[in-house]
Image (spheres, grey):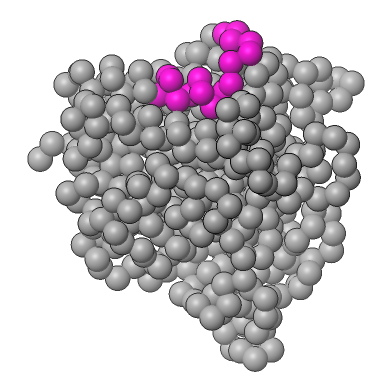
Amino acid sequence: MKRPNFIVFLTDDQGYGDLSCMGTTDFRTPHLDRLAAGGARFTNWYSNSPVCSPSRAALMTGRYPGNCGVRSILAGHRTATGLPATVPTLPTALKALGYQTAMFGKWHLGMAEESRPHNHGFDEWFGFLAGCVDYYSHVFYWGMNAENDPTHDLWENGKEVWLNGEYFTDIVTRRAVDYVRRAAARARPFFLFVPYSAPHYPMHAPRQYVDRFPHLPPDRRIMAAMLSAVDDGVGAILAEVERQNITENTCVFFMADNGPSRETRNWFDGCRDWYYGGTTGGLKGHKFSLYDGGIRSPGILHWPGTVPAGQVLDGVGAAMDIFPTFLKAAGGDLAACEVDGTDILPMAAERKAPPQRDVFWEMNRQTAVRRGKWKLVLNGQLVEGAPPEDEVHLADLDADMGETTNLKDRHPDVTAELRQTAEAWRARMEKRWEEEWIPQSTGTVTHA
């Protein structure tokens, strides 16, 4: 059997509801809608963290963030360490099987030499390494102080490059299209990672996209413009896949790294009010929160001939599942890897029941677990720095996807069992963190 190509698209700070195939009605995302219609759309897909670096680490390693050495947002200075070199990644595992590997976009898993993409399995890469950049100057400003000046952050295969005035989303798309063309001409399969930085602040988009949405308020208008640029980029890359006649042998996954940002720095005008440009599609919470608005993501799996078209799946999946799913599909040995995720292809390709398992999250003092329809959040946070809304919150997500009603007193046995399970998981992770990862130092911060 011919081994498949793999493409992963990742967006940044995108709400669960911010695709037209996920329910938004004030703008359209036709290329992603087409991708979803031609495969499986997940209604219960999750990132493994409500912030950037840990969610990306989970995707790359197939592990919970605390089990791969990245639990918080990583710093943006040029010596900031990140994903430990000792942790295998998906591109490393696929490269060992003969795959070509490439990344174009936002890395955010470390800026120090040992943490950069070429030391984690990528044959070639282009993009930035910190948490965000200006979309036109490619300068990292955020988190700076008197000791850390703004820093240019645009790289190609480890060497700094300057493309002033070019919109970052468009550059990523062009590079990815060119890569598909080159990779398809070779005899080996490829893995292409396209982590777009949009719609993460700063809120930038070319006029051609902004002008599409004169009817929308300013905050929503720029969000729609940024996501439309991504949608067009996905369409261009997949059009090249079709031109190369490799669609049937290319497995594509799309997701976001966490929920929408409400940070005031999105506004660009000194406004201190929360930002309202993104939507969670009715979910509670946002970026930084372990309520579903911070962690539930659009999830789309497309593989013609293998994954039947037109599916809407309600089984639970998470970013850490991509590693084992792709590695097994490529003929790799999962037994040789430490992974926390599971292969989701039987659910999507063979219509088998989703795996029965608990899925966990942690962020600062927050801990959460999902088991079937039940979701328990401990010390859940809605506003950064504020006290927890509820120290213990239990929701039935089948009946109440917005986690509006706390059922902890109506179901004390479920609450007690899930709390014990979540606290035991957190304790194991903390123990490993102290014994294994703290000595390696991840250089984390709590913003951007």
Query: Against 347, is 198 above or below?
Result: above
Q: Position of residue 168 (x, y in %)?
A: 57, 23
Which percent across, then down, holds residue 74? 67, 35
Q: Is residue 162 left or right of residue 310?
A: right
Write the residue at 63% across / 55% down. 279
Residue furthest to the bottom: 410
Q: Does the magenta stretch include residue 166?
A: yes
**Is residue 332 covered in magenta?**
no
Name the residue at 30% across, 53% down: 39
Seen in the picture, residue 279 relative to 389 is either above or below; the reply is above
Q: Which contiguous range is marked in magenta? A: 160-176
Residue 110 shows up from this direction:
no
Measured from the top left, where is residue 211 in percent x and y? 62, 33
Quarter of the image that includes the C terminus: top right
Q: How many labels does the image show?
A: 0
Q: Residue furthest left?
A: 1
Q: Is residue 444 or residue 305 the one in the foreground?
A: 305
Quarter of the image where the N terminus is located: top left
Report whether residue 448 is seen: yes
Left or right of 118 on screen, residue 217? right
**Residue 249 occupies which quadrant of the picture?**
top left
Residue 150 percent location from the top left of the image: 77, 18
**Front residue (pair 269, 301):** 269
Q: In this view, does 299 lie to the left or right of 217?
A: left
Instruction: Name which residue lies at 61% across and 26% down.
Output: 206
Residue at (67% x, 76% y) in the render: 404
